[in-house]
Image (cartoon, rainbow, N blue to C red):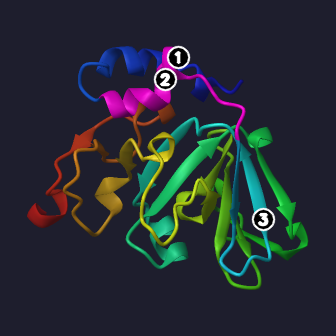
Amino acid sequence: LPAMFAVPRAVAQRIATQRPALTRAAAPSLFCRGFATHKGQCHCGEVHFEVEGKPDWSAICHCSICRRTHSAPYAELCGYKPDNVKVTKGAESLNMYNVHGKSKEDRYFCKVCGSKVYSMLNHLGCKAVHLQNLTSPNHGADGKLHDDFKPSCHIFYASGTITNLDALPKFETLPEAFGGDGKQLPNDFHDTR
């Protein structure tokens, strides 16, 4: 396994009393992955995918690339080992963008409707699917997220543009588990800068 999967144990133990939701995705005792297969698709239905089990992590990314490629203030991502994400229909309809070779991430999207399908996070050795594209469990129009998929933190919050008043930790860049410095920012960071 990539080194990133070994780090969450120490982080989970250190912050276990601070934020149970963050440790849910990281703690080894809770790292049990079900064998359930969950399905998703792009908006037009041209591309379908499956993910195996619960995500290893789930986060809300505020980085400038996610914001610009999604035309949104953030992207909700669920991370999986690469072998646990499979395109089951329409692979030929996927295009990839990686900032002309300058990004650490390869972003795959449907060339018919433009929906983001998944990103290969080369620097972390995992794939991230876009939470809102999951159809089972349904995270669509009803706006309800299954507990196993709820984000546990915000990443690259300093790069973002909006204030989130939820109780999730907001990391300036990345948590230590993902190679960042773990520096957290207040909810109102964007209102006070």
Cα–Cα gap, marks 2 and 1: 8 Å
Mark 3–mark 1 distance (CA, rounded to whole Å): 30 Å
Give the foreground label among 3 and 1. 3
Q: Tell me how far mark 3 sits from mark 2, CA to CA.
A: 30 Å
Instruction: Tell me residue 168's x, y (percent).
Output: 28, 44
**Which residue, given by chain and number where applicable, does mark 2 sit on?**
8
Amino acid marked by disc 2: Pro
- Residue 136 in sight: yes
Q: Mark 2: give few (<14), some (14-19) or many (20+) Cα within 10 Å.
A: many
Disc 2 vs disc 1: Cβ atoms closer than 8 Å? Answer: yes
Quadrant assignment for the C terminus: bottom left
Question: What amino acid is at disc 1?
Answer: Pro
Q: Residues within 10 Å of mark 1 (few under 14, many from 20)?
A: some
Residue with the mark numbered 1: 28
Q: Quadrant of the N terminus?
A: top right
Measured along the vertical axis of the image, is residue 33 above or below residue 187? Answer: above
As drawn, is 36 to the left or to the right of 79?
right
Quick one: SS at disc 1? helix
Question: Residue flagged by tag 3: what amino acid is it?
Answer: His
Q: Residue at x 80, y 40 (%)?
A: 83
Q: Nearer the viewer, mark 3 or mark 2?
A: 3
Quadrant of the rendered image containing residue 118: bottom right
Range of residues picked out in magenta: 20-36
118, above or below 84, in the image: below
Q: Secondary structure at mark 3?
A: strand
Residue 89 at x, y percent in the picture: 86, 66
Residue placed furthest toward the right? 92
Instruction: Residue 115 in the image: state x and y as whole percent.
Output: 64, 76
Q: Of 109 and 181, which appears nearest the observer?
A: 109
Which is more N-terminal, label 1 or label 2? 2
| Residue on which the image places disc 3 | 48
* Magenta-drawn stretch contains 22: yes
